[in-house]
Image (cartoon, grey):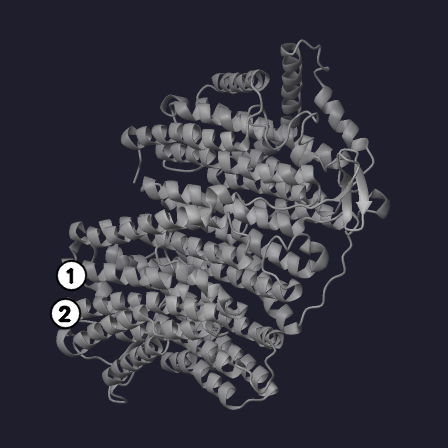
Amino acid sequence: MGLLEPLLRTSPLTLAAVLVLSPALFGLVVFGVRTKWSRKGVVTVAGWVLTLAAAAVFAIAFVGRAALTATLPADAAPWSLLVAGGDLALLAAILVIAVRFRSVKVLLAALVQLAVVLYAEFAGGHAAEAAPAVFIDWLSVVMVMIVSVIGSIIVVYGLPYMKEHERHLGIDEAGSHRPGFFLTMLVFLGAMNGLVIFDDLRWVFFFWEVTTLCSFLLIRHDATELANTNALRALWMNTLGGVGFAVAIALFGAHAQTYSVQALLRSPMGAAASVPIVAALACLMFAAFTKSAQMPFHSWLLGAMVAPTPVSALLHSSTMVKAGVYLLMRFAPAFHGTQLSNVLAIAGGFTFVATAFLAIGQTNAKKILAYSTISNLGLIIACTGLNRPLALAAAVMLLIFHALSKGLLFMACGVVEHGIHSRDIEDMQGLVNRMPLTTLIMVIGILSMLLPPFGVLIAKLAAIEASVHLPLAMGMLVIGSTLTVAFWTKWTGRLLTSEPGAVHPKIEHLHVMYFVPLVLLTVGAVAFSLAVFPLLTELVEPAVTQYYALVSGAAGGVDLSSDVLAVPWGLVFGFMAIAVAVPALLTRTRPDEEVGAYMCGEQIETPNGSGFITAAEQSCALSIRGHYFERYVGEETHALWMTVVAALLLAGMFGAVAIR
Amino acid sequence: MMAEYLAALAAVLVAPFIGGVLMGVDRIVSARLQSRQGPPLFQPFYDILKLFAKRRMAANTFQMISVSVYLASMVLSLALLVMGQDLLVLLFILALGNIMLILGGFSVKSPYSQLGSQREVLVLLAYEPLLVCMVVGAYIMTGSFSAASVFGLDRPLALSMPAFVVTQALVMAMKLHKSPFDVSASHHAHQELVRGLYTEFSGPQMAVIELAHLYELVLLLGFIALFWHTNLAVGIALALACHGAVIILDNISARMTTRWMFGFTWSFGLALAAANLAALYATGPLPR
């Protein structure tokens, strides 16, 4: 305890400052002092500082068993002016970008947002002025840990990756774009932390917009034509989402007289809320749909794969898209028991099914991962809309497990891409013989997304159990889960396809800054899955209890008992571990036991590996391809109508405001 | 608790014998329908013993892991059913085994096993929603996903969920690779896919797969018997009747395409399931 004592006594304000400001300061050092070693050193130290701060937040919350709250000294700074100025500065930056790249969509979205922000600041708001407060409950703790720990791991992984990336593009050290890159990445992490720990909605909005701008800069990083186009698409969609957020703030200010999220959640909500308040909640949902890349706004996240892999890993696993679902989970008590909540569940469920369906037809690894991210976020949103304790528990678990697995998969993809210079899963055929270590990590990452006893699946089962009372959503969860199995299985199949005779591949060498982050996340994904029950009782249940107390007004625990969780998982874990370990450790195929593939008796060896004799006595090398059913699940055929349906569902959420 | 574990252990020990005899009956009945004499009743056991005695040949080490997990998932699923555990979890543990077997098929660069694996993914896609819908139906009736709560009902499920007896028979035909659903692997190697998914497994690996098939058969029959748990004799008769129907269907129908199978199960099968579920939502007890 001796060492922990000072850590536990750290004030929430100090921790908030470290979590939000220190990444930006370290980023400025990286930007200012341009030597190879300072970059490596400072980025790594920044990662450690963030990780320690997150650990401290967790420890304090764990020991104290209550939310960490603190208010910034009211007279220390002109807070309102500061946040309003920050918002306007960000909008000015977006307007400059719009003009510089001649993007009408960005311009329009930014101008509308500007109008709304100005109205809210000067004409609309009647809310009492208060210094911004920090409010860190269990949901925030979970988010801070995801952002700070997984985010840091990804940024450290970015060090060797970006070096290789620039070498590949022929950029020398003097013209390197890396200082700016790591500054943006670190500011991004700080902004995400700010987004989840501040209680004042205007501050949340400010950090929300910082992530929009950072993601634009990161997607545009390679400055190719495609990168520009896709970055601008991300920018206009997220700025449009920002409009929704700003409208919500204006409505809350005018009709609830407060910007404090906690005060809002304690005011009459749900079925008791007035129409403007429910409309504000629908606006927040709209904002969350853009940020979490839900249909019909999913195209920006698909386009974001042009960015270097660390950016994708960061956007998909620990930041950006998680901000949207966080906002919804945060406000879930407010729309509990409304029709709006049900429509939200169905809209999220629809994205879950539709994108899992589209993923089946893809061969681009990063695109499959992108569709899977959108799909899983849809599932989390569906859980939020189902709005029951078990569903919220499933959402929190998915938040954690998805961040681990998806960060891992993107990083592994990046390593593979540098190894084989392709991100097509057809080119990954037989990767197990070429990069066995990375393949093993990748396969664990994939299996952790879909198989028992890994956490994602347990959360998914809990989600299905929680959805039984909303049959339409239940149907979507069932079909979506099944479709998910298809594309992951086909991908894993490509990785493992191997030529006979190559069963003892040489383990490849990985850069230590690739190896450590990959292993950390692999171990994390497996360990958290094994420890799913302590995780549930120590982390998820308190989070859900704090949420549910706001709904029922009653203190005390919530009942998370479920048949899924009551299964003797120890037995399942143990049995499966034995089933894998016994053949893996005890059977060694001797060279004389190795056989080639069966070709119906016409097999020959060709210079290109196995082959067979064709009809005209010609030798023909064997080539194998995966099947992607493009004719049935192709994007060209389905993406349009799916987007239209999703847009209608989104409109339906605003329609549901009237009937509450 | 102890009694549950003992019952599960007993089921795991006895199941292969029941499964083997039923498979022997299947082979004799099929042979007679084709005007053949057919093998002895215990031929499935002789086959497995013979396969175990064969020299081990493998294309890679992963094949061994794949069949091992396949068997483990079947055994575990049966144990969980007997223990009255969560049916949803059981389904996904079952799927785990199938996915590992598919990956084993994918792991060899052979056209036959690759094609078989590709198609088996589609077979899995075709029957999985039917299974989950059945479990959801049971949830509506009992307010729980656990098999134990089905045991606790005083009215057989078949009376309120008749359509699911039909879908379970369809699932059985698909999982046992019976015509017209034997698209990914056939019981006979005399067609264009050879043995499809199983082509590259041989000797002891094949023996493990065949052993797992015995468990799978008992598990599938157990699912159907669950529909008349109040009188297990009726439940078993129902299960055997479904098995008989599947055997006859196998012998009177030709193999269809994957596309047809997929269209059929997702239209006819899911429509049946949805209609029954709708009726349950309208009338059944759905506790809050």
Is the residue under label 1 in contact with that under label 2 (CB below 8 Å)?
Answer: yes
Going by the numbered disc 2, the residue's amino acid type is: Ala
- The numbered dot on residue A161 is none
Q: Position of residue B54 (x, y in %)?
A: 81, 33
Chain assignment, label 2:
A
A366 left or right of A18 in image: right
Q: Position of residue A459 (x, y in %)?
A: 45, 51
Q: Residue at x 60, y 46 (%)?
A: A626
Quarter-of-image position of residue A301: bottom left
Residue B32 vs residue A428, the one in the foreground = A428
Residue B119 vs residue A276, the one in the foreground = B119
**Neighbourhood count class around disc 1 (C-alpha, 10 Å): few under 14, some 14–19, many 20 upward:** some
Give the spatial CA distance, label 2 vs label 1: 9 Å
The image shows residue B94, relative to residue B181, as above or below, that is: below
Q: Position of residue A422 (x, y in %)?
A: 61, 61
From the image, tell me which residue sits under label 2.
A254
From the image, tell me which residue sits under label 1.
A276
Q: Secondary structure at mark 2?
A: helix
Going by the numbered disc 1, the residue's amino acid type is: Pro
Q: Position of residue A630 (x, y in %)?
A: 51, 45
